[in-house]
Image (spheres, grey):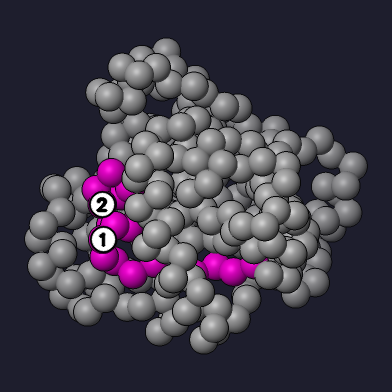
Amino acid sequence: MKMTLTPEEIKNGRLEPEKLAIAIEQVKANGYIVFDKVYSDEQMAELRAAFDPLFDEYIKRKGYNTGTNRAQMHLPFQAPFNDPSIIEHPIAMSVIDGLLGEYCKLSYFASDTPMPGSDYQAVHCDINPLFPDFSVALPPFSLVMNIPLVDTTEENGPLEVWPGGTHLHPDRATQDTLDGTINPHMHIVRAAEHMLSEKVYMSAGSIVIRDIRMWHRGTPNRSNYRRTNIALIYNRDWYGNGYTIQIPQEEYDKLPERSRLLLRHEKIGYPVKMPWEW
């Protein structure tokens, strides 16, 4: 589902109560919500200008890692990526807090980029089930937030998602099908071929919040320019996803209180880790 915000909501960073309730319900029931065009074109241009040379250097050093002409790249904790409006946007946090609680944490600071010539990914979810032998749907415990740096269209490889409850079937999850892994309980790549899916079209500067368990895949980028998403992951306090963000003490100290709370479990007082150092 896509929501269009009013200028007042964007300016004040606050959703009307009914809209907030609907957004939280959509993530619970359908697995995701889109807020179209939250950030300014100027901020997206600044992020692209900083991101593109980093990504070019990363590909030169490390190559593609999530499929043909497609790469996940960790972001360095430095400007303009670590702006509080990215880390703790009040509209995003109202939904995330409503799903994970106010003591949630941010533990993944990265990006996903399909380049021209990228191909379909296999359908997958981003996490293994917490209890694979326990066939009960658990409440959300980990959420992905994406911010597209360019408009997402049919031509440049939109994210394709399988809403309507794929995130609520713990025995059907598989962490990664890039290597051909088949879930022993269900062949989700085959199953997804016969299920309804949606492609997520949106403007640059939108916000997507999705349950990390939701089935999805990247689609081919047939344009002549990269389609980059900023990708952050927010977790309940007790859950970790195996990554840590290195944050210099001076950068941490400059952050607002909420950002410091979100990042409290990360590696504070360490030098910035560049993408190719992972």
Disc 2 from disc 1: Cα separation: 6 Å
Residue 138 drawn in magenta = no
In the picture, residue 81 is in which quadrant?
bottom left
Quadrant where the C terminus lies? bottom left
Residue 71 within the magenta-colored segment of the rendering: yes
> Residue at the spot x=40%, y=84% of the render?
277
For the residues labelled 2 and 1, say whether their Cβ atoms are less than 8 Å apart: yes
- Position of residue 193 measured from the top left corner of the image (x, y, whole percent): 88, 47
Tag 1: residue type?
Ala
Q: Where are the magenta residues, as a range?
A: 70-88
How many marks the image carries: the answer is 2
Percent x, y of residue 7: 35, 19
Figure check: 150 above or below 266:
above
| SS class, disc 1 | loop
Q: Which residue bears the numbered disc 2?
A: 83
Q: Which residue is mark 1?
A: 79
Q: Is 235 displayed left or right of 148 in the figure? A: left
Find residue 162 and report its horizontal and vertical position in percent: 72, 41
Vertical order, 234 against 63 (above or below): above
